[in-house]
Image (cartoon, helix red, strand yellow):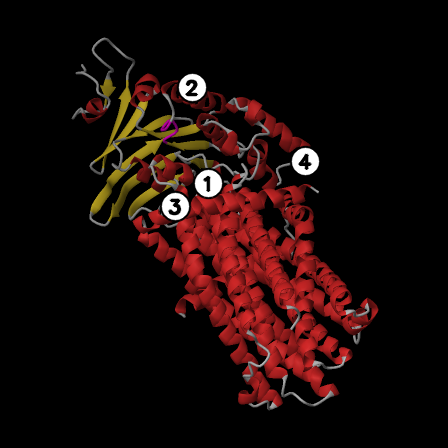
Amino acid sequence: MRWLGSLVSSAVDILALLAETLRSLKGVGRHPERLLAELSSIGTGSLIFLFATAAFMGVIIVFQTATQINKAIPDLSMLGAGFIRVMTAEMIPLLTGLMVSARVGSAISSEVASMVVTEQMDALRLANTDPTEYIVAPKLVASLVAVPILGLVSLATGITAGMLVGWIVFEIHPSTFLNFRYTYGYHFLSFCLKLLSFAVLIPLVSVIEGFRTGRQGAFSVGQAATRGVIMSSFFVFVADLSVSLLERGLWGAP
Amino acid sequence: MRGLLSHVGGITWLFFRAARYAVPLRLESREFSRILLHFGVKSLPLVLLTAVITGALMVLQTGAVVELMGATSMVGWASGVAVLREVGPVLIGVMFSGQVGSFNAAELGLMKITEQVEALSGLGVDPVRFLVFPRMLAMMLMLAVLTVYGDLFALIGGSIVSWGMFDLDPWVFWQQVLLPHPVDDLLEGVLKAVFFGLNISVVSCYFGLQVERDPWEVGVAVNRSVVTSAMGLFVIDYLFALARAGA
Amino acid sequence: MIVAQGLRKAYGDNLVLDSVELSIADGELVYLVGQSGEGKTVLGRCLFGLERADAGSVRIDGFEMVGATPRELHRVRMSYVYVFQHPTLFDSFTVEENIALPLRYHRTGSEAAVLRQVDRWLELAGVTPYRRAYPSELPFGAQKKVSIARALSLQPKGLILDEPTTGLDRATADALTDLVLQLHAELKLTTVLISHDRPNILRTASRVALITGGRLVDARLGRPAAEGIAIEGDPDRILARFLGQGPVA
């Protein structure tokens, strides 16, 4: 049951760190090179990965769904509509969240943990540089910029990939596929809300895990990296589920 | 592009260098146990929880499509399940690769920064034999176990959700999942996971050992290993699908 | 026996070692000194296979180091262990596990035998109380001692210590130097100390090799006298000035 307690304390830590980071935000301008470095690391570094994963998802979903539907009623005209709706509201945000967690979450927590173990964090403080401003804030800002963009790119990629499969394999014409009939405004809202919450949660959770490094040197850094992924993923799930439930609650089912 | 090729080359070289210790077997059992223990015992609960949630969420989402289709529940669920069977293991594989691989890349990366790897050499200890090979074996074993359990728990999560939210009898859900070739699927799953394990361990050790001086590089190494191994995962998955189609 | 002849090493335009010659007999204790950046560490590394000299020869127990394969160098380095300036202990392992690591890897005996050895080295280095602690929990001086103990576990013929006392306060530096001397005497180790710790050099050295301007001054120190230490082999009084010593007979 102890892990439950640590989850709760993590949630508290996240809020605390968020508050502190927001206060440091204005100082971010003092270290523009950090912001650029983070943008490149979080953003462009993830692109290919997300391309591949989103395309993979899109292909599989369309392929499997179409195959099954064909067996019962060979009418695939509505597939596109449903597909787009599911990708936008559910699949792509979650996928983006998980992939960014795995990639960025572990990278941030291991980087921070390494700095703690090699005493660089202490060195920063001694040099009168606030770690929150120098390290955490740029990551948060970069994340807020990059994650939504990554989400949009993934969405486009996934839909395109699914559409291509639908056309080439099942002869569904793209024009019938790109059917937004079942996708409502609040689905886009869901999409954005999920991505934003991921953008906030992932860097903060990972930084916290990085700072929680133990005293076993390299092993502790490895542990921090693992925990970074696990905890980021966990909070991504929580956020995703919350927004989905909220959406259902406010606007009802489909 | 050239960078990518040199990495692939390096990774392959490291694999062969490590594989030399397989025959005859020279395993550092302490290191092997240490890694297994860390992942097997300590991370397991949260990892399995993650799997359950993944399964649940995936069903929630594919279920939404199905409701929309208005297709008969059988067909809908067949598609949901088919997606789950395809995507589930890969998604879980990527997540576990992320967890396991980042541990490696980070630990080895820090050891490089603090010159511990050089110190090993100075004591006559071959870093590949001491650090890489045990991890390779441990992770192959671990990922096989984790993926099998992970898939199982994901399906449990999925069946709970389909029962709770869409009123689908769990028995029906399991039937759709376990048929048509339960044993084949299980074996394929284990074999695939073993390859996943090999992939992630070698890739993450490679990038970890590439680190030189700065903690920032550790983050880069972790990044690269997660991404590269995920790509590898897709390739492995694709190869298995090809093999399955051919057979 | 370590014999270096005509050693040459340059970094770009900077000729750090210019035809350096040095002979160290078995069981001898030699200080390798010089200003920071003058090349004492480079010389140390070239002598023991950590770096390759551009020209010249280094023979350790008859074996030619320059041009040897990494594997051969490796084998020599197990007999003449280089202890780095930074303790570089394995921070994921306890002190005990650190010292046991090379023993276990090289399968030197049963687990019980290994533990007995570990006891011995912990004792000799004076770090027994720290046995179950992790390196990050140890004071710097203790970490240095553990790194020495770990080097000794291989039962080498020689020990090369790179700046052993740098970063230590005066008392700990003196204690560590005394420890090294004690180990040298008890275990009959060929010992090379790379250092610029003047007080300890003056206090404990008998043979000093000074590197400056690419050249080596190989001198012997007499015992302290009222006017300063007698230095043999230092005609231009370079070493004397380095050590801050007054005129000598």
Same subunit, tags 3 and 1: yes
Query: What's the magenta region?
Result: C163-167
Label 1 with label 4: CB-CB less than 8 Å? no
Q: Sequence order check: which comes first, mark 2 or mark 4? A: 4
Measuring from the top left, give residue B97's x and y in whole percent. 59, 59
- In what element is the residue under mark 1? helix
- In what element is the residue under mark 2? helix
- In the rendered image, which quarter is residue C112 located in? top right
Q: What's the CA distance linking mark 2 and mark 4?
A: 34 Å
Same subunit, tags 3 and 4: no
Same subunit, tags 1 and 4: no
Of all residues, the one furthest to the top in this rendering is C226
Q: What's the CA distance linking mark 2 and mark 1?
A: 30 Å
Whether residue B208 appears in magenta in the rendering, the answer is: no
The residue that disc 4 covers is C110
Whether residue C33 is visible to the viewer of this picture, yes or no, is yes
Q: Sequence order check: which comes first, mark 3 or mark 1? A: 3
Name the dominant secondary structure of the magenta segment. loop
Mark 3 or 1, closer to the camera? 3
Which residue type does callout 4 highlight?
A: Ser
Mark 2 neighbour density, 10 Å: few (under 14) some (14–19) many (20 or more): few
Left or right, residue C61 beside residue B107: left
Q: What's the CA distance linking mark 1 and mark 4?
A: 38 Å
The residue that disc 2 covers is C175
The residue that disc 3 covers is A24
A251 is higher (above) or lower (below) than A115: below
Mark 2 or 4, closer to the camera? 2
Q: What's the CA distance linking mark 3 and mark 4?
A: 57 Å
The residue that disc 1 covers is A116
- At a point 68% along the width and 41% down the height, the residue shown is A2
